[in-house]
Structure formats: C-alpha cells, structure tokens
Amino acid sequence: MDFIVKPLIEQDKGWVLEVVRRWGDDFIITRGRKVYPAQLAGFLAESPDGEKIGLATYEVIGDQCEMVTLDAFKKFSGVGTVLTEKVEEAAIAAGCKRLWLITTNDNLDGIRFYQRRGFTIAAVHVNALEHSRKLKPVIPLIGQHGIPLRDEIEFEMWL
Ligand SMILES: CC(C)(COP(=O)(O)OP(=O)(O)OC[C@H]1O[C@@H](n2cnc3c(N)ncnc32)[C@H](O)[C@@H]1OP(=O)(O)O)[C@@H](O)C(=O)NCCC(=O)NCCS
C-alpha cells in the first residue's frame, strides 16, 4: 500500500486531538502521568488520496524518548513499522540514548509488533492501570480479547 509519512504541523493538531478523544479524553496515562499527545511532536501517514491512515507521537525528556502513541488506522500495511522508524530517527537526531514506550497486557498485537521491531521488555508495571483509572476513569476494566486490562508493559530500544 502506498503512503507518505510527514512530521506533524500546527494544522494537524485538531485531527490529533480528535484521534486522542476516541480514547476518552484529551490525555493518555503513561507511568502514572497525564500526557497530551496533541501538544507533542510526531508523524502522520497519509494515503495518496489524502486520507490520514496513521499517527505516532513522541516526547523527548533528557536523553530518553517516549513514543507516546502509535496507531495504524489501516493495519498490516507497514504503516506502524514506518512510523516507528521515523520516531526512532527523530530520537537519534535529538541525541537520545533510549527509545521507550508503554503498552498494556491485553495488546497482544502490539507486544508481538514491538518485539519484532527490535524492542525488548524493560519492565512490567503490575496493576499500574488501577492508578491510571484514578486519573482517567474511562479506562475500561476489560481490554482486547476479553483480557482484564491491568498491567503496563514498558518496552525499550537502546539507540
Ligand atoms: C500495533 C500497530 C501500530 C501495528 O501497525 P501496523 O501498521 O498494522 O503494522 P505493520 O503493518 O507495520 O506490521 C504488522 C505485522 O503484523 C503482521 N500481520 C499481517 N496480517 C496480520 C493479521 N491478520 N493479524 C496479525 N498480524 C498480521 C504483518 O505481517 C507484520 O508482521 P511482522 O511483525 O512479522 O513483520 C497497529 O496494529 C495498531 O495501530 N494497533 C492499535 C493501536 C496500538 O495497539 N498501538 C500500539 C500500542 S501503544
């Protein structure tokens, strides 16, 4: 499938916010912290007809880069792979030593995807979602495949 990847610009912020709000609010919770993806740098993937088919956002703090969100709206076409590579390149360009991200215990596709892309598990934050729900009560109790949504899995890649 043909698509191009572009850095997010100011005019994309409304769309990013729209995407983020599908998950219940303007922010997501990562490691017990509210993070607002629409305020972050990132990349979007666009099909030749202009449809936005993927989004990645990231945040650099010191020499660490967190990939805060990654979404392919057309799955299994390479969009997630290319967006991840772009974030990796941006992290290297920013002088980061480590790229990391959080996913959840129910995200079996994600757990597979990240390990196939060179990430390793750095930590499992057991029952972290209990605290996340205090900050964002709309986080469901049951996740994908009917799996109780419970733990944060921290993946990392040394750059
Ligand atoms: C995880 C995610 C970003 C991957 O993006 P993607 O564009 O689908 O990924 P790609 O096309 O680059 O690669 C998908 C892989 O799945 C494989 N695949 C193809 N068809 C598949 C199917 N029907 N079921 C499962 N895997 C399939 C592809 O062959 C590829 O395999 P590989 O890892 O062995 O190379 C995407 O599934 C997604 O948006 N998920 C929902 C949001 C999410 O979970 N985000 C990340 C967590 S924070």
Image (cartoon, rainbow, N blue to C red):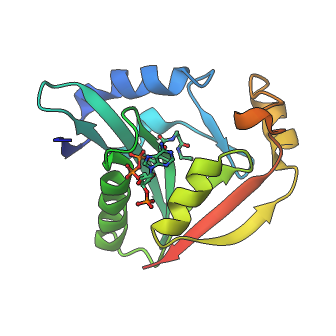
Residue at 20%, 44% in the rendered image: 6
Position in image of residue 29 (x %, y %)? 67, 41
On-image quarter of the C terminus: bottom left
Residue at 79%, 33% in the rendered image: 146
| Count of numbered tags | 0
Position in image of residue 10 (x %, y %)? 26, 32
**Between residues 113 and 156, which one lies in front from this camera angle?**
113
On-image quarter of the N terminus: top left
Going by the image, does 31 lie left or right of 16? right
Residue that lies at the very extreme toward the left in this rendered image? 48
Position in image of residue 138 (x %, y %)? 75, 22
* Residue 41 versus residue 138 in the image, above or below: below
**Between residues 44 and 64, which one lies in front from this camera angle?**
44
* Residue 83 versus residue 16 in the image, above or below: below
Residue at 74%, 50% in the rendered image: 105
**Between residues 10 and 86, which one lies in front from this camera angle?**
86
Within the image, what quadrant is residue 3 found in? top left
* Residue 35 versus residue 135 in the image, above or below: below
Going by the image, does 16 lie left or right of 43? right
Residue at 45%, 40% in the rendered image: 71
Position in image of residue 23 (x %, y %)? 60, 25
